[in-house]
Amino acid sequence: MSLGHHIPQKHQSFSSGFFPSPPIQNVHPLLAKLVTLSSTHFPTFPTMEPNNQPDQPNPRNIIFNKYEMGRVLGQGNFAKVYHGRNLLTNDNVAVKVIKKEKLKKERLVKQIKREVSVMKLVRHPHIVQLKEVMATKGKIFLVMEYVRGGELFTKVNKGKLSEDLARKYFQQLISAVDYCHSRGVTHRDLKPENLLLDQNEDLKVSDFGLSALPEQRRADGMLVTPCGTPAYVAPEVLKKKGYDGSKADIWSCGVILYALLCGYLPFQGENVMRIYRKAFRAQYELPEWVSPPAKNLISNLLVADPAKRYSIPEIMKDPWFQFGFMRPIAFSIKESVEDNIHYFDDVDNNNNNEEDEVSMRKPSRPFYNAFEIISSLSHGFDLRSLFETRKRSPSMFICKFSASAVMAKVEAAAKKLNFKVTGKKEFVVRMQGAEEGRKGRLGMTVEVFEVAPEVAVVEFSKSAGDTLEYIKLCEEQMRPSLKDVVWSWQGDR
C-alpha cells in the first residue's frame, strides 16, 4: 500500500495534561497528522537528510576554528540543523544551532538541557551520538553524528517492509531502547520519524527532547506527564494515574513493528478519539501476510495492561526476535562530552549583545576543596550537598602519592586486570577491557588531581559498557588491586 500522497505533514509530538480537543475527519489510517495535544508546543526536531532545499551560509563559514558550516539540513521552531565538517578529522557532522533568546521566549530551556543530559548518557551504535556542545553569547551549538540516510518514516511511507528487513530494524530499535532503559532513560516519543538510517541502512534513534530521566519520576518510579505522539502513545500514558516509562516505550515499539510489517497503523478510526478508544482496548487486526511468530510477538507488545505487556528481556527471548540477532558491540568513547550545561546559564539574562562573539574559554579543570576531601575521609561528615554542582563520581579515592606516581600504579593495576590503555593525556588515562560484556567491552576513564605535593585524588568513571558490570569490577577487582595505594575511598566509614 503506497501512502505517500496522503500525508500533508508528519505526526506531531505532545507534552501536556490534556486530551486532544478537535477531532479530525477523513484521516488516513497511518500517516495523517493526528493533532498536537498541547498547551505547550514541543516541535519535532529537524531531520538530518542530505537532500533538503539548500540554504548556503557564507562561503567558508568556520565556527570555533573547528567546524566548517554547510547547507541547512532542516529547520524547526527554535533551531536549524546544518551540515558541518570537522576541519581536523574531515568527518561529516550535523550541527544544531539554537538561539538562546528563542529558548527563553518559548520556555524550552529545561527541555534542551534534558536533551543534552540524556544524549551524554546514551552512547550506543544505534543512537545518534552527541559529539560536542559549544556556545556563543547568543547561540548554542550541538554537534551531532551526521546520519545521511534519512528517516525510517520515508521507507514506511512507501509501503510495508519485508519481514527480514522489519526484523533487522526492530532488533536494532530494541537494542537501543534496552540501552537507554539500563541508564534510567525513557524516550517517550518513539516513532518512525525519530528513527534515522545511516549510510549502511542501520537504524539510529534520535530526538530525545521528550525523554525522561530518573529524577523526573515519582517516589513509586512512575512518570506523570503525558507526552508522545498520539498514534504511538501507550493507553496508560493518557490516564493521568502515572505510568511506567519503560513499558510505554515498549508499546510504541509494538506500534512501530506493526507499521513496518503491515504498512499502516494498528488503530484506525474516523477521528482521534475513536483511535484512542481502540488503543485502550488493544483492538486491532493483523493481515494474513504477517507470519504467526511475528503475530505472536505483536500480540504481546500491544497489550493494554502494561503489567501483562512484554518486557525487554522477554522480547529478546522471543523466537521471532532472536532469529539472526547479534547484539551490537558498544563502541568506546574517545572523548566524553563535557558538562557544558553552563552554556544555558545566561539564557535568562536580559542582555542584548550587538555581536555574537565566540567564547573560546575552556572549562576549568575540576578541583577538590577541603570539604570534599574531609567528606571523602568521613562517611558521617558528608557536606557535599551544600556545595556540589557536578555529579558525584562513581568511584573516588585519596592517596599519599604524587599524581605521576599514582598514574603509574593505576596503569599497572589495570594491566593485571587485563585492561589496555587506549588514550592518555596529562593526568587522564582511558582504558578498555579485553572481554565482551552485556553491552560490549567495559571502558573506564581515570583522572588524577594533585591537591598537594604528596596527596592526590583519583576519580574513576565508566565510559563504555554495562553499568552493573562496571560497579562489580570496581568493588570486586579494582579496589583490592589498589589497596596498597589508597588512603581512603570516598564514603568509606
Image (tube, grey):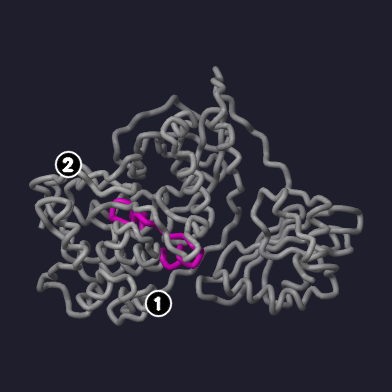
User: Which quarter of the figure has residue 177?
Assistant: bottom left
The residues bearing labels 1 and 2 have C-alpha atoms spaced at a distance of 38 Å
Residue stretch rendered in magenta on the structure: 176-200
What amino acid type is highlighted by mark number 1?
A: Pro
**In the drawing, what numbered circle is on residue 8?**
2
Residue ranking furthest to the front:
241
Look at the image and tell me whether residue 366 can be seen: yes
Which element type, helix, strand or loop, lies under badge 1? helix
In the picture, the quarter occupied by the C terminus is bottom right
Residue ranking furthest to the top:
354
In the picture, the quarter occupied by the N terminus is bottom left
Residue 197 on the magenta span: yes
Is tag 1's residue or tag 2's residue first in the polypeptide sequence?
2
Look at the image and tell me whether residue 160 can be seen: no
**In the drawing, what numbered circle is on residue 313?**
1
In the image, residue 200 above or below residue 147? below
User: Which quarter of the figure has residue 234?
Assistant: bottom left
Q: How many marks?
A: 2
Q: Residue at x 65, y 65 (%)?
A: 444
- Quick one: 430 or 236, which is closer to the camera? 236
Within 10 Å of disc 2 (Cα), the crowding (few <14, some 14-19, many 20+) is few
**Residue 170 placement, left or right of 486:** left
What amino acid type is highlighted by mark number 2?
A: Pro
Image coords of residue 193 (percent x, y): 29, 51
**In the drawing, what numbered circle is on residue 481?**
none
